[in-house]
Amino acid sequence: MTERAIKQPDTTTVGWYEFATRHRASIAALVVLIFPLAMPFTALAVNILIYGLYALGFNLVFGYLGLLSFGHAALFGAGAYLCGIAVVHFGWPWYAAIAAGVTGGFLIALLIGVLAIRTRGIYFAMVTMALSQCVYYLFYQAVDWTGGENGLRGINVRSIDLFGLRLDFINPLTRYYVVATFVIAAFFVLSRILASPFGAVIEAVRENEMRARASGYDVTLTRLLTFVLSGGFCGLAGALQALHLSIVPIEIMHYETSGLVVMVALLGGMGTFFGPMVGAAVFLVLENLVSLWTVHWQLIVGAIFIACVLFFPTGIWGTLIARGRR
Amino acid sequence: MAGLSFDLIALQLFAGLALGAIYVLFAIGLSLIFGMLTVVNFAHGAFYMVGAYVGLYLISLGGNFWLCLIAVPLLIGLFGLAVERVLIRPLYGRGIDYPLLLTFGLSYVMVECVRIAFGKTGYPFDTPEILQGAVNIGVGYFPLYRLFVIGATAVVLLALWLFLEKTSFGLIIRAGARDPQIVRVLGVDVSRVWLIVFGIGTAIAGFAGLLAAPLQGVIPEMGGTILAEAFVVTVVGGMGSIGGAVLAGLLVGVVVSMTSLFAPEMAKVSIFALMAVVLVVRPQGFFGRAGLLS
């Protein structure tokens, strides 16, 4: 109950920061809804949503739990592949396929989590990266199911049918709002998780593991559960990615996809609610702009990332918050 | 199983040792840097890759392979010194994740620079003429170059061991790994020790890249694959332990080559299965100190 008391200070002097924190999911939803007005390229906007969701799931582990995972590509990719397989091989409708993707994220996260959670700190980054490479090779070799090197092709979902309503999934703007619906739902779920007592435990484990343990919380279980939850968000992002691209390339599981989300989360601001979305937007817009005049965008992106680590370790959003609160 | 004679298995075992030797060199640099600086060098694969490319470039300028064996580690080591001094040093004391993230970004930059300089496609790397062909090692004919890789690795390991155990600077390094604060109190410039250790570690990575080049050719992405596999080696052997890196590196090499003989499609996955078993049975690895990081 004391958590409540701390979170709701003197209501008469609520600053913008406290207001934004309390209504973070609603604000995020509003921004997502009006975002296409500011972003003329809807395909890019959909990508931003999907990578933002992916980073959101990653941030749960990196920012809130304080564990650096270098294996999230396996969770993202599992979501994409399972969603794709459900459509291509079983002919499932879109909602069942997305559910399959989320389940895929949960399952792979559970498998990796059970092993990796036995280690900590730097070890965790290395073990998750190695295990995700293992998942990569497994999917690479299951050619009958995944298409192997060529990727899984033919995930054609033309329309989204819901209670007699038929939405045209080919139309970019409709597609954006379909994806946005899922992302907004994820915002509210994540906000709820973070505001719950369990969310407080997650941050307690990050801040001081010994004290959390002494207070009677099962640290290992908390870590595993958070990792699995993160897998669910990333699985959803992967499933949406599969429907959006209508193909799942094998590179989705490569460790560069894991590194990408680390960059996005750090760029935006780890451990902040809006950071991952801001990071995804800045990263993807930057990538698009840079690749307009050079094919070597990785050079620029890598250099910016190095600069971020050296000079803005709290990321764009984290720096803004620190300025705003001062 | 008719074709699988004892000789074939023995030959495959030797091939595994040669592959393992590359893993050992790679992982030892990683382990050395981590043991001293508590920095996980995600750019280690990039240093390895650049080592192979520098060798390729020097040979194209007219140098020979033997010259490269000396020049490549020196050049990569110098580059490593510069990286530590300029990029990594500001991050000490700022949490263990930051150097890792920085070196990750650095690997992007290095790979892309090599792509700009040498193009995206790979190159073959000729085995030096003296080392071409095969020799009879009792159980059959074995490629001479692979034997050379094993020998060169043994020499590097011996030199490293003598350096760490028998010289006064090695003594400082070992003391610095155990307790940098006390070493600093005793009047040693620890940051200079760290600088040199990073240089040595990256120099060994460059050397490993050069040795691996004739075996598999050079491409800009060659560092990424071995990095993940080297993580397996360090987890299995125990992070920060040099003996562990040697044993686990050879073990991983043998496991890969044995599974590619019996079940080729499982070769890549097998080492990760090995890591999973070690994690379950002994999370700190063969020689890792319990509680260091787990």
Image (cartoon, helix red, strand yellow):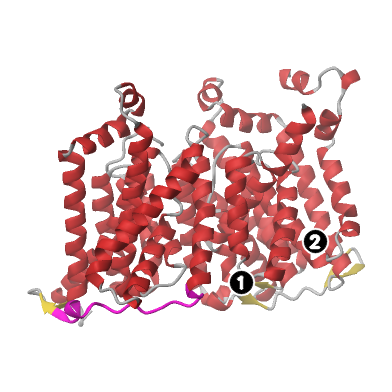
Magenta run includes residue B20? no
Furthest residue in direction left, as rendered? B138
Q: Which residue bears the numbered disc 2? A: A45
Residue type indicated by callout 1: Pro
Which segment is the magenta one?
Answer: B118-134
Q: B144 or A227, which is in the foreground?
A: B144
Q: Do the residues at discs 1 and 2 belong to one chain? A: yes
Density class for disc 2 (Cα within 10 Å; few <14, some 14-19, many ≥20) is: many
The foreground one among A106 and A267 is: A267
Q: Is residue B261 left or right of residue A245?
A: left
- Judging depth in this view, the residue of B77 and B201 nearest the camera is B77
Residue B107 in the image, given as x and y percentages of width and height? 49, 57
Instruction: Say which chain tag 1 marks.
Output: A
In which quadrant of the rendered image does the C terminus of chain B lie?
Answer: top left
Q: Which amino acid does label 2 sit on?
A: Ala
Residue A249's tag is 1
Number of callouts:
2
Could you tell me which quadrant the N terminus of chain B lies in?
bottom left
